Every structure is written in C-alpha cells, then in structure tokens.
Image (cartoon, rainbow, N blue to C red):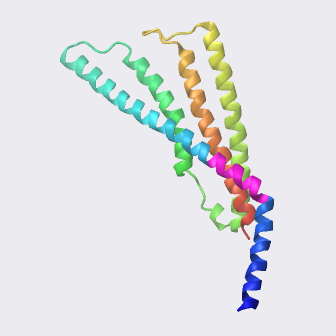
Amino acid sequence: MKKGSLVMVKNASSLENTSGDGSLFNKFSSKLNKLAKGYNRILHGLSCILLFAMMFLTVFDVLGRNLFNSPIVGTYELTGFALAITIFFSLGAAQLKGDHIEVDFLFKKLPERAQHICNAGIYLILTFVVMLTSWQLWVYAQRLMQGHNVSGDLGIPIYVIAFLTTFGAIGFFLTLLNSFVQSLMKAVEAK
C-alpha cells in the first residue's frame, strides 16, 4: 500500500511541476475565455433585441403602408443600421457556439495534433485580420464623426453605427483570440 501511495505522490508532484510552468498561460486562457464569453453574451443579447425591434418595425411599416397608406418614415435606414449592428454583434457569439461554416472533409483525416496546429494557425491569421478590421472600423468611425456625416431621411449620425459595429468586431476578435489560445493548448497537449 505504501509503495503505491509513494508512486502516486511522486506522479502528483511531477504533474504540479508541469502545470506550474503553464499556470500563467492557463490563467490567461481562463480569463480570456471568461472575457470573450461575457462580452459576446452581452452583444448577442443586444443583437437579439435589435432583431426583435427590426421585426416589429417592418411589420408596422407594412401594415401602415397597406392599411393606412402611411409608411413609417426612415424604416429602410433604421433596418439597414440595425442589421449591420446585429450582424457584427452576433459574429463573436456564432464563433463561440461553432456556428460558422467549416469545410473539413480532408482536415478530419489528419492526426489530432496536426488538426490543432492547423486550427491554431488559421485562428492566428483570422485574429490578425479581424484586429486590423476593428482598427480600421474605428478609424473610419472617427472620420465619419469629424465629417458630421448623417443619414438621408432621419439625420442619424452614421459614426454612431460605425462605432457600434467596431464593438462587435472587437467581440469577434476576442473570440478568435480565445479560439487560437485554446487550439494552441490542445496542440501542446495532444499526442
């Protein structure tokens, strides 16, 4: 009995040393995961509310147009703005749920470690591209704000929409960064 427990103590201490080296990375991964999930949960909730509002706006616009010959002014603008915000706010949530389309019929034939390495590389590239996209959306929104650009019918400042889509792109960036870190960890752990 004592011999077996000595082996278990020895194995447990070696695991502690191994996890001690990666504990900072594991803590970072855990914090990033919580941040990405929390941030995107809020954005996704807001996108659901916007989608619901678009549905009501469209229904009442059609009813007003057909029954009273009086459509709601600015419905086209509001629907377009809300749709852009809804799409950007939902990108991160779709990534977290794995709802994006993947073509993986050849990819699944690779060994597990190779799959995780490929995923890490793909997520790294996507993270970089979405980071650049977020940055350029922010710069574009600032230019729109300086130019005082407004929509045609309702006079809504367009920079507000651009800033909101930037927040959605940042949420997508956080999820892709999280996916990269998770794939990297799986690649290291895989045999």
Q: Position of residue 118 (x, y in %)?
A: 72, 56
Tell me if residue 27 is in the magenta stretch.
Answer: yes
Q: Position of residue 79 (x, y in %)?
A: 41, 24
Tell me if residue 171 is in the magenta stretch.
Answer: no
Q: Position of residue 158 (x, y in %)?
A: 54, 15
Displayed quadrant of residue 53 = top left
Displayed quadrant of residue 13 = bottom right
First to last magenta residue range: 22-33
Specify whether 17 is left or right of 64.
Answer: right
**Relative vertical location of residue 182 with respect to residue 66 in this rendering, above or below:** below
Residue at left offset 73%, top offset 61%: 187
Q: Nearer the viewer, residue 166 or 101?
A: 166
Count of number-bearing discs: 0
Identify the image quadrant of the N terminus.
bottom right
Specify whether 46 is left or right of 142.
Answer: left
Residue at left offset 38%, top offset 14%: 74
Residue at left offset 19%, top offset 14%: 68
